[in-house]
Amino acid sequence: MNQGVLTQIASEGGDGNPALVPVLCFLFAMGLVQVVRPQLLWRLNSRLQRGWVKNPAATEPTGKGYAMQRVTGVLFLAVATWILVRQI
């Protein structure tokens, strides 16, 4: 891309889709849940495994797995916050 195009895109800011803000707020809330209580997301998603997994409880992440989910959630929240601030 051309540097002038990048500058123009960056200067436009909040001229985006108005439906993007509510979607970002929902995703932001999901990111907060992922950081604060990743076990809750696993419990909700484990119900989807019941058809083809013999023991869904055996697929629960370890403590290190939950820590990695929290790190990913923090990175996601940082990006979602940046996008949300740019849209408002």
Image: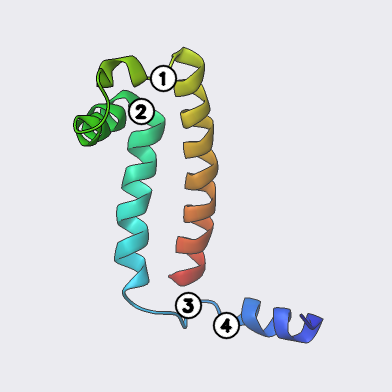
Residue sitting at 79 percent across and 83 percent down?
A: 2
Question: Who comes first in sequence, dot 3 or dot 1?
Answer: 3
Mark 3 neighbour class, 10 Å CA radius: few under 14, some 14 to 19, many 20 or more:
some
Residue sitting at 31 percent across and 74 percent down?
A: 19
Mark 4 neighbour class, 10 Å CA radius: few under 14, some 14 to 19, many 20 or more:
few
Q: Position of residue 48 (x, y in %)?
A: 22, 36
Identify residue type, mark 1: Pro
Identify residue type, mark 4: Glu
Question: Who comes first in sequence, dot 4 or dot 1?
Answer: 4
Gap between marks 3 and 1 measured at Cα: 39 Å
Mark 3 vs mark 2, foreground winner is: 2
Badges 4 and 3: C-beta atoms under 8 Å apart?
yes
Identify residue type, mark 2: Pro
Mark 1 neighbour class, 10 Å CA radius: few under 14, some 14 to 19, many 20 or more:
some
Residue sitting at 27 percent across and 26 percent down?
A: 53
In this image, 38 relative to 12: left or right? left
Question: Who comes first in sequence, dot 1 or dot 2?
Answer: 2
Q: Position of residue 1 (x, y in %)?
A: 76, 80
Gap between marks 1 and 2 measured at Cα: 10 Å
Gap between marks 4 and 3 measured at Cα: 6 Å
Mark 3 vs mark 1, foreground winner is: 1
Gap between marks 3 and 2 measured at Cα: 32 Å
Mark 4 vs mark 2, foreground winner is: 2
In this image, 77 relative to 39: left or right? right
Q: Which residue is mark 3?
A: 14
In this image, 59 relative to 53: left or right? right
Q: Which residue is mark 4?
A: 12
Q: Which residue is mark 2?
A: 38
Quadrant of the image containing the C terminus: bottom left
Q: Position of residue 78 (x, y in %)?
A: 53, 47
